[in-house]
C-alpha cells in the first residue's frame, strides 16, 4: 500500500458541512480517517485504483478498511471490501461516486446489514454528503465524527492514520523520542 496520495488536501481536517470532493464531484483517491469527536474510536479507509494490467479488477477503484495496526502502510494491514464506481443521479443526470460493497461482504437483504455496509454508508455520508453526526447502531446515541485526511510524520515521513498522531503531526515512536530528548 502506497502512502503517497493524490489528495490535494492531505493533512487537513475537513470542516463539517464541507464535503471532500473534487470539482468533478468524485472522491479523491487516498486515505481518510473517520474519528469519533470524543476520541473513543476511529476507522481509516483507503481508496485506490487498480493498475490497468492488474489480475483482479483492472482499472477499478477499490475501497479498503485499515484492519491492521494504526499507522501501517503495508498491504496486509488493509482489507478491500467495495468498488467505487461513478453512477448517474436519476433526477439531475449528474454523475456521483457510489460505493458497491462486495457480495461476500454484505449482510442479508432486508434482515441485517453487515459491518462493511455500515462502513460504506458512513464513508459516503462523511466524504460525499458532509454529514458529521450519526446515531449509533449499538446504543442509539447520536455522536459527532471528524473526517481527517492522512498525512505523514513530520520527523520520519511514516504514514499516520491515528487521530492523535494526525492532530500532533508526529507518530507515537517519534513522539517518544522527542519527549526523551
Ligand atoms: Zn515518525
Image (cartoon, grey):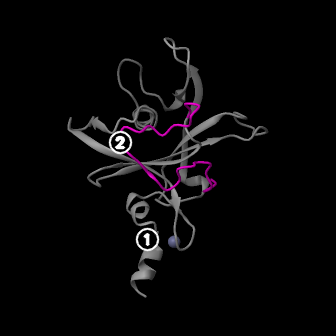
Q: Is residue 24 magenta?
A: yes
Question: Is 115 situated above or below 70?
Answer: above
Please state the horizontal and vertical placement of residue 77, each as a whole percent of the image.
54, 54
Say whether disc 1 or disc 2 marks the residue closer to the N-terminus. 2
Please state the horizontal and vertical placement of residue 60, each as a whole percent of the image.
67, 33
Please state the horizontal and vertical placement of residue 176, each as a whole percent of the image.
42, 78
Neighbour class for label 2 at 10 Å: few (<14), some, many (≥20)? some
| SS under mark 1 | helix
Taking depth in this image into account, of 11 and 75 the one nearest to the observer is 11
- Quadrant position of the C terminus in the picture: bottom left
Give the extent of the magenta segment.
1-26
Taking depth in this image into account, of 153 and 67 the one nearest to the observer is 153
| Closer mark to the observer between disc 1 and disc 2 | 2
Neighbour class for label 1 at 10 Å: few (<14), some, many (≥20)? some
Taking depth in this image into account, of 113 and 181 the one nearest to the observer is 181
Please state the horizontal and vertical placement of residue 159, each as a whole percent of the image.
54, 61
| Tags 1 and 2 touching, CB below 8 Å | no
Question: Is 38 situated above or below 117?
Answer: below
Which residue lies under the disc numbered 1? 172
Which residue lies under the disc numbered 2? 16
Residue at horizontal 62 percent and vertical 43 percent from the top? 48
| SS under mark 2 | loop
In three-dimensional space, the C-alpha distance between marks 1 and 2, rounded to whole angstroms, equals 27 Å
Amino acid at each position: 500500500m502506497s502512502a503517497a496520495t493524490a489528495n490535494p488536501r492531505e493533512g487537513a481536517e475537513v470542516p463539517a458541512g464541507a464535503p471532500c470532493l473534487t470539482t468533478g464531484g468524485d472522491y479523491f483517491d487516498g486515505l481518510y480517517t473517520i474519528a469519533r469527536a470524543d476520541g473513543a474510536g476511529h476507522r481509516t479507509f483507503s481508496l485506490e485504483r487498480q493498475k490497468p494490467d492488474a489480475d483482479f479488477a483492472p482499472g477499478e477503484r477499490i475501497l479498503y478498511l485499515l484492519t491492521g495496526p494504526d499507522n501501517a502502510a503495508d498491504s496486509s494491514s488493509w482489507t478491500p471490501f467495495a468498488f467505487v464506481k461513478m453512477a448517474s443521479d436519476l433526477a439531475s443526470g449528474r454523475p456521483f461516486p457510489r460505493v458497491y460493497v462486495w457480495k461476500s461482504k454484505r449482510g442479508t437483504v432486508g434482515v441485517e446489514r453487515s459491518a462493511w455496509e455500515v462502513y460504506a454508508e458512513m464513508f459516503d455520508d462523511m466524504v460525499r454528503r458532509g454529514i458529521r453526526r450519526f446515531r449509533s447502531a449499538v446504543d442509539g446515541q447520536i455522536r459527532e465524527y471528524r473526517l481527517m485526511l492522512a498525512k505523514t510524520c513530520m520527523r520520519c515521513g511514516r504514514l499516520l492514520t491515528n487521530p492523535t498522531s494526525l492532530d500532533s503531526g508526529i507518530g507515537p515512536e517519534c513522539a517518544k523520542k522527542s519527549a526523551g530528548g
